[in-house]
Amino acid sequence: MKFCLRWYDRLPSTNTFLKELLEVDSQLPSGTVVATREQTHGRGRRGRSWLASANENLTFSFLLLGSCEPQKLPAAAMAAAVAVAELLTQEGISADLKWPNDVLVNGRKICGILSEGVPGGIIVGIGLNVNMQNAGHIDQPATSMLIESGSRHSLDELLEKLLPILSGRLDEWAQGGFSRVRKKWEAHVPNIGKMISVRDGDAFREGLLAGFGENGELLLQDQSGTVSPVWAGDVSS
Ligand code: BTN
């Protein structure tokens, strides 16, 4: 995957901005990356907002176009989460993945990912807490690279390091879907084989986390041993 990176000083939301760029230029190439040093109206999953102060949060989005089956698309964000976990490991911070695509450190959220469909593909937006001294609470307790490692990081340098890793994971995903990144994903999931609960709106299910299916769906095993797929929801232990 070849990326074409555009940095901005301030944007409301990199996901929204990239969507607008695509609306005015239908030839915008797959791999276009929009990053901003300050994001004023960041959006999270399930209509939540994503707060980020200037130079404290690596906020960027990339465009992924291509003729692949729609059921394969959600796993692109999971491949991106694997890349972030690998970057953190490289920086000396051990990271876990929480389905569908949160990155946690010591049980606290350090990165959130929002993927949204556009004609012919998806936009994947990544928010990584980098230099926040107090990360507070996102949709759950949060942390930052500064809190975990004691070091500040340059957003530009981090993105330069992340893009090649991301490119590798997305190439694997493009070749073989989630199956190609499953091992790397599962290597960062600590609660396989443990009891979890999944809430999707008013629906609430409990069971054993049996693993992940070929499109990245979560596999939940109930008391009778029946394994069923879960395609959306918020997981807690
Ligand atoms: C979540 O955990 O709810 C997902 C958060 C995603 C935030 C990122 S920051 C860059 C991109 N632009 C946005 O408006 N949102 C995503």
Image (cartoon, rainbow, N blue to C red):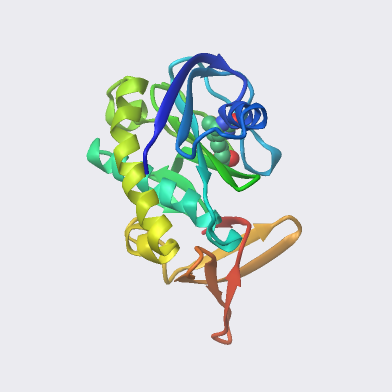
Residue 169 horizontal/vertical position (percent): 35, 50
Task: Identify the residue at image location x=53%, y=58%.
Answer: 68
Query: In the orientation shown, which residue stands out farthest toward the bottom?
Result: 224
| Side of 27 relative to 160 (left or right) | right
Foreground residue among 22 and 224 = 22
Q: How many marks?
A: 0
Query: In the orientation shown, which residue stands out farthest toward the front?
Result: 27
Relative to residue 227, is residue 169 depicted above or below?
above
Q: Is residue 140 visible?
A: no
Displayed-image quarter of ligand 1 = top right
Foreground residue among 77 and 96 = 77
| Side of 107 relative to 93 (left or right) | right
Residue 16 horizontal/vertical position (percent): 64, 29
Task: Identify the residue at image location x=73%, y=63%.
Answer: 203
Task: Identify the residue at image location x=49%, y=56%.
Answer: 75
Relative to residue 81, is residue 4 depicted above or below?
above
Query: In the orientation shown, which residue stands out farthest toward the right?
Result: 202
| Side of 153 relative to 202 (left or right) | left
| Side of 124 relative to 170 (left or right) | right
Relative to residue 12, is residue 31 depicted above or below?
below
Task: Identify the residue at image location x=64%, y=23%.
Answer: 41
Residue 36 horizontal/vertical position (percent): 49, 20
Q: Which quadrant is the N terminus positioned in? A: top left
Foreground residue among 40 and 72 = 72
Residue 4 horizontal/vertical position (percent): 41, 30
